[in-house]
Image (cartoon, helix red, strand yellow):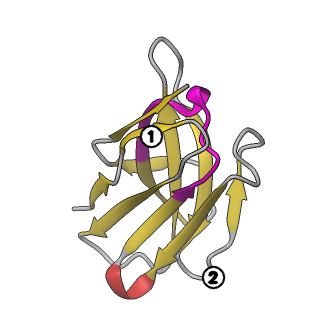
Amino acid sequence: QVRLVESGGGLVQAGGSLRLSCAASGRTFGNYAMGWFRQAPGKEREFVARITWSDGYTTYADSVKGRFTASRDNAKNTVYLQMNTLKPEDTAVYYCAAAIGSSAIYNDWGQGTQVTVSS
């Protein structure tokens, strides 16, 4: 059973940085992709970033491109989301999720971590 545990959220001022972590366990993730999503109060969950375990290929939502960077540490089975130049509109609960191969269907989700950016 896949288990995903996010950490690293918190309160930060606009312009600041945070690094989120997602520790994955329960299977071999070599052919998986990991996604980062977020959900702000009253809004639908939205895609933030995606990274493949095998080669570290990344994709980003336009709203975070150039500010957020996804990375992974295969030895630690952990993916990261480095968030720089944070804006109040980045405030949300951030989730990591796992998808098999090139699928856009994420079957396994973490519990989320709160990120609050004050103006």
Tag shown at residue 22: none
Identify whether 16 is placed above or below 73.
Answer: above
Q: Residue furthest top?
A: 42
Query: Disc 1 marks which residue?
Result: 12
Q: Is residue 17 left or right of residue 97?
A: right
Residue hosting label 2: 55
Q: Is residue 49 left or right of residue 115?
A: right
| Circle nearer the N terminus (1, 2) | 1
Residue at 55% in and 71% down:
71
The answer to whether any part of residue 103 appears in the image is: no
Residue 21: percent from the left, percent from the top?
38, 61
Q: Nearer the viewer, mark 1 or mark 2?
A: 1
What's the amino acid at mark 1? Answer: Val
Q: Is residue 55 above or below residue 48?
A: below
Query: In the rendered view of the protein, which quadrant contains the C terminus?
Result: top right
Task: Give the residues drawn in magenta, as a range.
Answer: 82-95
Residue at the (43%, 84%) spot, across then down: 74
Secondary element at image label 1: strand
Nearer to me, 109 or 12 = 12
Position of residue 95 measured from the top left corner of the image (x, y, whole percent): 41, 44
Image height of 92 relative to 49, above or below: above
Q: Check disc 2 and report its element: helix, strand or loop.
A: loop
Kind of residue at disc 2:
Asp
Numbered disc total: 2
Contact? badges 1 and 2 (CB < 8 Å): no
* Residue 60 inside the magenta-drawn segment: no
| Rendered image quadrant of residue 113 | top left
Quadrant placement of the N terminus: bottom left
